[in-house]
Image (cartoon, grey):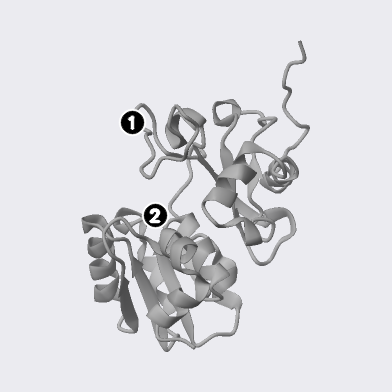
Amino acid sequence: MLLKSSPPSTSLVEIAQSYSLSFPGSPAAEYIRHRGLDSIATRMGLGYVELPATGHEKQDGRLAIPYLRPAGGEHGVATIRFRCIAERCTKHPDGTWRDVEDHESHGKYQSLPGSKPMLYNTQALIRPSPYIGISEGEFDSIASEIAEIPCAGSSGVSSWRDHFDPAFLGYERVFGFADGDGPGEQFIAKLAERLPNLVPIYFDKKYDVCRFVKEYGPQALREKCGLS
């Protein structure tokens, strides 16, 4: 039997590239296609942990989400987050996708040890635009990008930091995407206290940016934000 071995990678950039090369045709690619995010998966550098790097053994079989940095080079990946895509958690016993995933026995996401809260998709911050979005999580940020609305992602109120604020103050409008639940509304309320240019964008219960774009299409999100 062939055993998996760690790739000879030493930097996060190399590790992320290794995972990205394992993405096509993988369970991660199937999952991302199911979520309706496959059209820009390559651009976002999404990967699959087929051969875990040293120290990443517990992430085997997970989706890899690199936090890419615009400057690139040896510091082009700030961190990597990992998402469980195991069939027992994402599908019913008959193989159909669950509407609500079951990750009760473990965390849905895992970060690298010592990682500090940071913004996802900071490339959005350097593209000329009078508006930008802020979402809860990476998938909503990606879905917003599919609708051609630049969007940075945060993992929630507890992960927002004071030094994030200045990056958004120069925009005419900052669309605050609120998941259709209590925490989502709390997240936007907190942002509204910090950003005077925030425009709350609310979704119905059980909806978020990702599910909304998948079900209604990218143009529907633009219209919801008052964009043509």
Q: Label 1, secondary structure: give it.
A: loop
Q: Inspect the image, locate mark 2, and give the three-letter code of the amino acid beneath it.
A: Ser
Residue 226 located left or right of residue 1:
left
Q: Which mark is residue 104?
A: 1
| Numbered circles on residues, count | 2
Q: Say if 161 sits above or below 92 in the image.
A: below
Q: Say if 117 sits above or below 121 in the image.
A: above
Within 10 angstroms of label 1, few (less than 14), some, or many (20 or more) residues? Answer: few
The residue drawn where x is 56% and y is 72% is: 124
Q: Say if 113 sits above or below 171 in the image.
A: above
Q: Inspect the image, locate mark 1, and give the three-letter code of the amino acid beneath it.
A: Glu
Q: Position of residue 119 (x, y in %)?
A: 48, 61
The picture quadrant where one finds residue 154 is bottom left
* Nearest to the observer: residue 75 or residue 203: 203
Q: Say if 90 sits above or below 215 in the image.
A: above
The residue at which mark 2 appears reads as 155
The residue drawn where x is 49% and y is 56% is: 139
> Which of marks 1 and 2 precedes in the sequence?
1
Q: Label 2, secondary structure: give it.
A: loop
Residue 27 located left or right of residue 226:
right
- Quadrant location of the N terminus in the rendered image: top right
Residue 167 visible to the viewer: no
Q: Position of residue 25 (x, y in %)?
A: 71, 41
Q: Position of residue 7 (x, y in %)?
A: 76, 31
The residues bearing labels 2 and 1 have C-alpha atoms spaced at a distance of 19 Å
The residue drawn where x is 64% and y is 61% is: 39
Residue 117 located left or right of residue 55:
left
Within 10 angstroms of label 2, few (less than 14), some, or many (20 or more) residues? Answer: some
* Nearest to the observer: residue 86 or residue 47: 86
Q: Position of residue 90 (x, y in %)?
A: 45, 37
